[in-house]
Amino acid sequence: MQRKTSQRRAILNALEFAPGPLTPQEVLEQASKEQESLGIATVYRNLSSLEEQGEIVAVHLPNDSTRYEPAGRGHHHHFRCEVCLQVFELSAKCPVAILEGVTLPGGFKVQNHELTLYGLCPDCQNPA
């Protein structure tokens, strides 16, 4: 059993309370507020270990760095702001779930999907 260090706790807290999946650099920035001595190598090492243990999952968005979020959140989608580049988790009901298991024209059968919406977050729509 892996012992929970204060660094690991800080990383898990950063991911748990983020509005969406974070890059390793964003994890470092957030977790450093709780654990000042945290370094990027420690973040990468812990993210790898946490992913192997199934506590977090990697999120791969087109043209973006790998991001991470806590495991067990179920099927959901993401929104990426084109200005601040922050990624948000969407909790709305899945608009394309009805396609899963359906055979489309041409014999294609949908078994899974990922959806990322792009636009402007509320803060970037109304800059101060």
Image: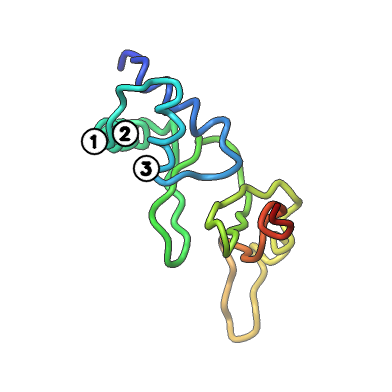
**Number of numbered markers:** 3
Tag 3 residue: 24
Task: Identify the image quadrant of residue 8.
Answer: top left
State yes or no: discs 1 and 2 in contact (Cβ < 8 Å).
yes
Q: In this view, does 106 lie to the left or right of 21?
A: right
Please tell me how crowded label 3 is: few (under 14), some (14-19), or many (20+) other residues with Cα within 10 Å: some
Q: On residue 43, which mark appears?
A: 2
- Label 2, secondary structure: give it: helix
Q: Which residue does the image show at 60% across and 54% down from the upper left?
A: 78
Q: On residue 41, which mark appears?
A: 1
State yes or no: discs 2 and 3 in contact (Cβ < 8 Å).
yes
Q: Which residue does the image show at 56% across and 52% down from the upper left?
A: 87
Task: Identify the image quadrant of residue 107.
Answer: bottom right
- Label 3, secondary structure: give it: helix
Q: Which residue does the image show at 65% across and 62% down from the upper left?
A: 100
For marks 3 and 1, the one nearer the N-term is 3
- Label 1, secondary structure: give it: helix
Task: Identify the image quadrant of residue 28.
Answer: top left
Between the C-alphas of marks 1 and 2, the distance is 5 Å
Question: For the residue marked with disc 3, what is the amino acid?
Answer: Pro
Tell me residue 39's x, y (percent). Answer: 27, 31
